[in-house]
Image (cartoon, rainbow, N blue to C red):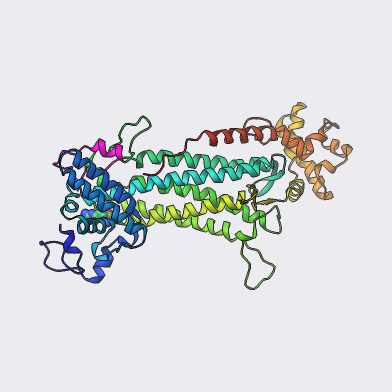
Amino acid sequence: MSVNQLDKKSQAWSALFTEPMSELVQRYTASVNFDQRLWRSDITASLAHAEMLAAQGVISAQDWADIQRGMAQITREIETGQFEWKLALEDVHLNIEARLTQLVGDAGKRLHTGRSRNDQVACDIRLWLREQIDLLGALLRDLQTALLDVAEANTDTILPGFTHLQVAQPVSLAHHLLAYVEMFTRDAARLQEVRQRVNQLPLGSAALAGTTYPLDRERVARTLGMVDAQGAPCLCQNSLDAVSDRDFAIEFTAAASLIMIHISRLSEELVLWMSQNFAFIRIADRFTTGSSIMPQKKNPDIPELARGKTGRVAGHLMALITLMKGQPLAYNKDNQEDKEPLFDTVDTVRDTLRIFAEMIGGQTHPETGQKEGGIAINAQAMENAARKGYATATDLADYLVKKGLPFRDAHEAVARAVRAAQQQGCDLAELPLAELRQFHASIDADALPALSLRGSLNARNTLGGTAPAQVRQQIARHRARLQNQTPPPAPL
Ligand code: ARG
C-alpha cells in the first residue's frame, strides 16, 4: 500500500488500482471524521510497536529516534488543532502514518512493519476504552459519594416505601438511596471485569495470521500496561480472533446500558418526587427548565432526558450485537461501524454520571469547600405521605403473630381494621384501642408503638433491613469500600 500516494486526493489506492474512488464512495468508506478521537491511543500503540521493532533489530535505532521525533511533532500538531485531517486518507491510522512519513521519511514507512491496520485498530480501541472505563469508574464513585452524603443526612427520614407504586411500608430515605448505591457498586464491578478483557494486546496479529518478523509481543504489552494484577502481560492468543472480535465493546456497552437503566430508575423517582402531588424533593433550578407557555412550570428535564438517553445507549448495544452477528473470520470492514455507537455510549454515560453526581450531591463552594445546591429533601412531605397509606398494617399483623396467631389470620384481622379506618378516613394508629380490639382481642396498648412509622422502621433491624441502625452500618461499609478502592493507573 502506498500511503503517500493517497495523500493526493482522488488518487488510486496503490499501483494495483486502475481508477480512483468517487467523492461519495470516499466519504462512505472514510472513518477519519469520527475515529480521529483515537489519535492518542494510535500514537501510543505505534510508539510501543516501534520501540519493540528497534529492540528486536527489525528497524534501526535511528529509525526509532526519527519515529519518536515525528510522533512528538504530530502530537503537538493535533493538540494545537494544526493537524490537517484528510478524508482521502480514510482513517486516523493512515492520516498519522502519512504525516509521519512526510516528517521523517523512510523511518515513517518502516513503522508498519509486522503490523496491519487490523491489529492496529483493535489495539487503539482497547487502549482508548480502557481509559474511558477508568474515567467512568471514577464518576460512578462520585455519584455514589453524592448518594451517601444525602443518605447520611437522612437515615431517620421516613419515606413511604412502594410496591406497585402503592404505599407499602415505611422505609428510611437513606435506605432507599442506598439501594441505588448497591446498583452502582455492581455497575462499577462489572466495568472492572470488562476491563480485564479489554486490556489484552492484539498487536502482533498483523492482518489475520500473525507475522514473519520476530516480534516481542510481551514487551509491547508491558509497555502499554496490558498486564494482569500480577504484572504478567495479557496477549490475545489467536490472531484471527484478535483482529476480528469486538465482544469486549459489546460487553462494555451492555455494562453501560445497565448503568443507564439504573439511572433511568432513579430518574423516574426524581421526576415523581418533584411533582406537586408528591413534593418530596426539589432539585436546583440549574437542572430544571421552564415552559414557554406556562409561567409556573419548572420541569425536571435532566432526569427526563437521562431516562430518554437510556434508550439511546441500549440501542447502541443492539447495533453492536447486530454488527458482530454472522461475521466470518477474520477482519471485515463491518467493524468500522463499531466506533460511533461505542463513542456515543461513552459520551452519554460520562455526561449523565457527571450531571447526576452534581444534581444530587451539589457542587463544592470555591471558598468554604462545602457542597451546596444538591437535592433538597422535604422530610415532612415524605412522612405525611407514609402516614396516609396504612403503611404499618404489616406491623400490626406481625404483632398479632408474635401473640400466637397464624400469619394468615392476623393478615385477615388487620385487613378488616384497615377497612374500618378507611371508612372513617383515619390512620390505623388513630383508631381508639377499644375499636382496634374488636378486630382481635389480643391487641393491647403495646400494639400502638408498632403502629407508629418510627416503630415500624426500627423494628426491621436485620441485615439489609431499613432500621436506621442497619442503614448507618451500611453507609459506613460503603464509605470504607470507596476509600479502599485503588485508583486506576494514570493514563499512558
Ligand atoms: N478504519 C478501519 C476500522 O475502523 C481500520 C481497519 C481497516 N482495515 C482494513 N483492512 N481495511 O476498522
Q: Position of residue 28 (x, y in %)?
A: 28, 65
- Above or below 28: residue 238: above
Disc count in the image? Answer: 0
Between residue 230 and residue 323, name the one nearer to us: 230
Looking at the rendered image, the quarter that the N terminus falls into is bottom left
Q: Can residue 251 be seen in the rendering of this structure? A: no
Ligand 1, by image quadrant, is bottom left
Picture quadrant where residue 2 is located: bottom left
The residue range painted magenta reads: 201-223
Between residue 84 and residue 172, name the one nearer to us: 84
User: Residue at the spot x=76%, y=31% of the render?
Assistant: 399
Q: Can residue 229 be seen in the rendering of this structure? A: yes
Secondary structure mostly taken by the magenta-highlighted segment of the chain: loop
**Which residue is farthest top?**
404
- Above or below 205: residue 339: below
Q: Is residue 184 magenta?
A: no
**Which residue is farthest bottom?**
293
Q: Position of residue 119 (x, y in %)?
A: 24, 47
Between residue 134 and residue 108, name the one nearer to us: 108
Looking at the rendered image, the quarter that the C terminus falls into is top left
* Left or right: residue 18 compared with residue 120: left
User: Residue at the spot x=29%, y=52% of the render?
Assistant: 72
Picture quadrant where residue 272 is located: bottom right
User: Residue at the spot x=17%, y=55% of the render?
Assistant: 105
User: Residue at the spot x=16%, y=38% of the render?
Assistant: 214
* Left or right: residue 470 compared with residue 320: right
Q: Position of residue 317 (x, y in %)?
A: 40, 52
Q: Is residue 216 magenta?
A: yes
Q: Position of residue 484 (x, y in %)?
A: 52, 33
